[in-house]
Amino acid sequence: MMRPLAVTAMLLAGTTLQAETLSVVGSWSGLPLHKNYEQPFWTEKLPAAAGDLDVSLTTHDQMGIGGGDVFRMLGDGVFDVGMTVADYAVADTPALEGLDVPMLADDADQAKKLVDAARPLVDDIYKDVFNAKVLGVAPYPPQVVFCNAEIGSLEDLKGKKVRASGRMTAKLLDALGAEGVNVSFGEVPGALQKGVVDCAVTGAGSGYSAGWWEVSTHLLPIPLGGWDPVVIAMNMDKWNSLSPELQQTVQTGVDQDLVAPAWTAAQGALETDIACLTGNGECPVGDAHEMTLVEPAEGDVATVREALTGTVLPDWSERVGAEWTARWNDTVGAAAGLTIE
């Protein structure tokens, strides 16, 4: 017969060993970052590593909420973990625009170097503005230009309405003579089809997955919108409630099984994505399409850099103030070899 004390001990153990729970909101459900990395990490790899951990996963588009609401709701404790593009949150904090400055990184290695340099700034922003602990930053592919209009160079964007992937990209487009337009990612195909915009900026792979090739004719593969990094953050109160052991398991898992493979995949992804969109090369992920590839003209990069350093970054500096400008110069600017005067 089981002794009363043993029964009591078992009941107490059952009470104290209840599984920890996490409610997680991921980035766009139809894009490779979520399907290939976020979903398997949160639903398979982390629960296996943590043992008693129940994770419920959805995405902001499946919930029907805007990308700009994700980190506000995270801070309020509506869910425990949120992941979305940092640029969606710049309305709450213009300083966050400094994480993803267009045209500073030509490849994934350089983009990661700049993101790593920006982490102290990003960590402080999320702690102070969103009551959140940053767990990691993962990339989307380089943000290039899709047009449903005939273009032959960067110069041909002048006078056209172009959907920007973020506020700093919109400012850059304005400086180049185009009109930066704010349209959510999910609304872009309709906007291109109806002529609300002539062109739109997003990752080449994202545009492929979302079917932008159906409503676009020309592809300009210049990273005019930066890399659109996705911030992975946990509500600070939830983070502080976790045991040190579970905190370590979560952080190690995000670093090794979510962020690291996403950055590895980003290296060289543009070449593959261009092949899939234009048929110029082999497409290993599906059917290739027939968009017209517009090779950047000589001097295009120099033109964009001049607009960036002469207009866009000084404008951002004026909006965020001297303290944030100095911090950016000492971190991201130093890593990019660029100083905002």
Image: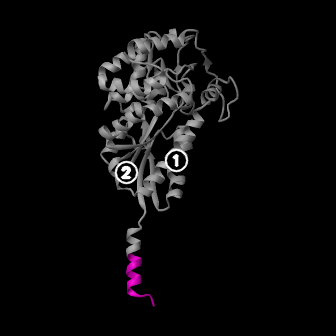
Quadrant in the picture for the N terminus: bottom left
Residue 228 visible here: no
* Residue located 34% across and 28% down the image: 95
**Disc 1 marks which residue?**
39
Of labels 2 and 1, earlier in sequence is 1
Circle 1 Cα neighbour tier, 10 Å, few/some/many (<14 / 14–19 / ≥20): many
Quadrant, the C terminus: top left
Q: Which residue range is magenta in the image? A: 1-11
Q: What residue would you read off at disc 2?
A: 239
Q: Nearer the viewer, residue 308 or 147?
A: 308
Whether 169 is drawn above or below 177: the answer is below
Q: Is residue 341 left or right of residue 268?
A: left
- The quadrant where residue 221 appears: top right
In this rendering, would 311 be left or right of 145? left
In the structure shown, which secondary structural element does the residue marked by tag 1 occupy? helix
For the residues labelled 2 and 1, say whether their Cβ atoms are less than 8 Å apart. Answer: no
User: For the stretch drawn in magenta, what is the main secondary structure?
Assistant: helix
As displayed, is residue 244 above or below residue 155? below
